[in-house]
Amino acid sequence: MRIHKRAATVLSALVAFSGFALTTAPTASAAGYGCSGSQIGAYAVKTSGGTTFGTAYLYYDSSTGKNCAAAVKNSTGGYGASTYTSVSIEKCTQTSPASVCTLLNPRVYDNDGDNYLYYAGPVSVSSPNNCIHLGAVIWNGNGSFAQYNSGAFHCS
């Protein structure tokens, strides 16, 4: 999916160079930021002081049994600026919700983190009969960061 994000960056640059106004930044929200299935959650990615830098979106595709996620920046979190943004999703040993995700050995996870303009992801994991853990980090470019970490939740 990095190709998609890079294509969006190139498109934005071409539009800016051509002099046309881009009224909305390129997103893939209609396609779930590269995730298939239905959105089952949206979680604020906040600083320790409570400022929201973006949202971690979680999707579930019942036809494949996969959970998928993306971390999307907002304007406070540096939307449109190349700053470090990451999202991760991991299968837990738990089969019912818990405050902490106990990790499998070997671990079953997917993560994506780099300097992105709009969002990190998609990342996905299959977790039939198990809970998942979702994590996201967004740096705003001014030395501040926000994060979201779930416990073991969305148990299939």
Image: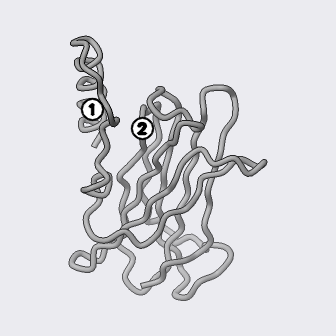
The residue type indicated by label 2 comes to Tyr
Pick the residue in front: 142 or 133: 142
Residue located 60% across and 52% down the image: 45
The residue that disc 1 covers is 8
Residue located 48% across and 26% down the image: 81
Instruction: Give the quadrant of the N terminus.
Output: top left
Q: Position of residue 48 (x, y in %)?
A: 76, 49
The local crowd at label 2, few if under 14, some if 14 to 19, many if 20 or more residues have their Cα within 10 Å, is: many
Q: Position of residue 21 (x, y in %)?
A: 29, 23
The single residue placed furthest to the right in the displayed view is: 49
Question: In the rendered structure, are the residues bearing label 1 and label 2 in contact, judged by CB atoms less than 8 Å apart?
Answer: yes
What secondary structure is found at the residue carrying circle 2?
loop
Query: Is 82 drawn above or below residue 86 in the view shown?
Result: above
- Earlier sequence position, callout 1 versus callout 2: 1
State the separation of the CA atoms marked 1 and 2: 9 Å
In the figure, is residue 130 to the left or right of 1?
A: right
What secondary structure is found at the residue carrying circle 1?
helix
Which picture quadrant has residue 3? top left
The residue type indicated by label 1 comes to Ala
Q: Position of residue 107 (x, y in %)?
A: 48, 65
The residue that disc 2 covers is 118
